[in-house]
Image: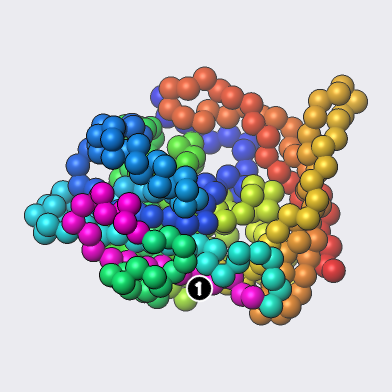
Amino acid sequence: MCAKPTAEKLPGTAKTAKLVLAVEYFRGWGKDILDGEALGKELAGELKKFLKTNKAELHFIRRPGRAGQEREQLGTRQLFIAWADAQRAGFNPDQPYTPILEEMQITDVRQLLDLDLSRPGVNPQATTVDRNILLICTHARRDRCCAIFGRPVAAEVSKDYDEVWESSHTKGHRFAPSMILLPSNYSFGRLTSDETRYMLDGARTHKLTFHNNRGRGTLTPPAQVAELEVARRLLGLGIEPGLNDFATHETTVEVVRDSQGAKSKKVKVEVLHFPTQRSFRAHLTQTDPIEVLTSCGDAPKKQRGWRVKVLEEI
């Protein structure tokens, strides 16, 4: 049984990461790419420590279809380093949000351990590229929904868009096809092939697509929701938001109780739109719990989301 759409809202569900590695891996990925099945226990363990130390996420990727396995004959594999928050070490209204994508060729996954992930531009074999890549989850061993819904979209769209790659787990099987746009790290879910093409066309000119946008993964869930709400407000004012137009951060978090004593949170988020220098403050509360089927075959779980109660310009 595949996870079915529910009343759960997509904004605020993006997989969080500020630094993402995507490395080409031609053979089976296992249920978890670092469970030892694909790489062996020793290397998988070393990579887990390396990623934790560098606060990085890792995805296995491959080209859709037979080409994804035939590329093994080349003797090298593609590596992308997405610095999704490269110039946002702290909230600074004078410093624009500028994600950076680097690419390089390696011959062995073990070479990931030799990377310097302190900042962009320090790995001599890596080249900065001005383009996007789209990771579409097709990780069937993790969740069959991703194979059922992800593979056809990846195969179809990749015919005309070479930025498309099949990917390991991108979080959110229930939103399959689940996908991540790098280097900006916006996540999307349940896009058709045509909708994916539309989103990629926009991304090529740095335009932000709203449809089934789950949020920017450099942010916390409430901040993801707030940023998209501000973007919609601007669009309503005739201002078309771009992919890299915002600086967003939480300012306060408050734990509250309802009349039955159940805990929930209230959060304030500030969002700056760089091109217009307009600032907004969003007041968010958690939604009531709803049942969601988070993965194929799992029992339903209750989860809360986030909603903007008040949005004010400051």
Rendered view: 3 above or below 181 = above
Q: Looking at the picture, how far across and down is residue 235, in whole percent?
A: 67, 69
Residue on which disc 1 sits? 206
Name the spot of residue 210 as percent of width and height, x first: 58, 60
Residue at horizontal 64%, vertical 47%?
Answer: 221
Q: How are the colours assigned in the image?
A: rainbow
Compared to 117, does 28 lie above or below?
A: above
Relative to 259, does residue 82 appear above or below in the rendering?
A: below
The picture places residue 70, in percent across and down from the top left corner, at: 12, 52
Q: Quadrant of the C terminus?
A: bottom right
- Using the rendered view, name the quadrant where residue 285 is placed: top right
* Closer to us: 217 or 21: 21
Left or right, 102 with respect to 75, comes to right
Residue 295 visible, this angle? yes
Extent of the magenta region:
95-115
Which residue is located at x 37 percent, y 39 percent? 146
Q: SS class of the residue under badge 1? A: loop
Q: Is residue 148 left or right of residue 256?
A: left
Residue plotted at (58% across, 29% down): 292
- Residue closest to the eye, 4 or 119: 119
Residue reaching furthest to the left: 73
Is 108 within the magenta? yes
- On screen, residue 176 versus residue 304, left or right, reads left
Task: Residue 190 in the image: state x and y as whole percent.
Answer: 47, 46
Residue 184: say if magenta.
no
Q: Residue at x 28, y 66 (%)?
A: 104
Q: As rendered, which of 140 and 185 lies closer to the eye?
A: 185
Q: Residues within 10 Å of mark 1 (few under 14, many from 20)?
A: some
Residue 158 is drawn in which quadrant? bottom left
Nearer to me, 29 or 5: 29
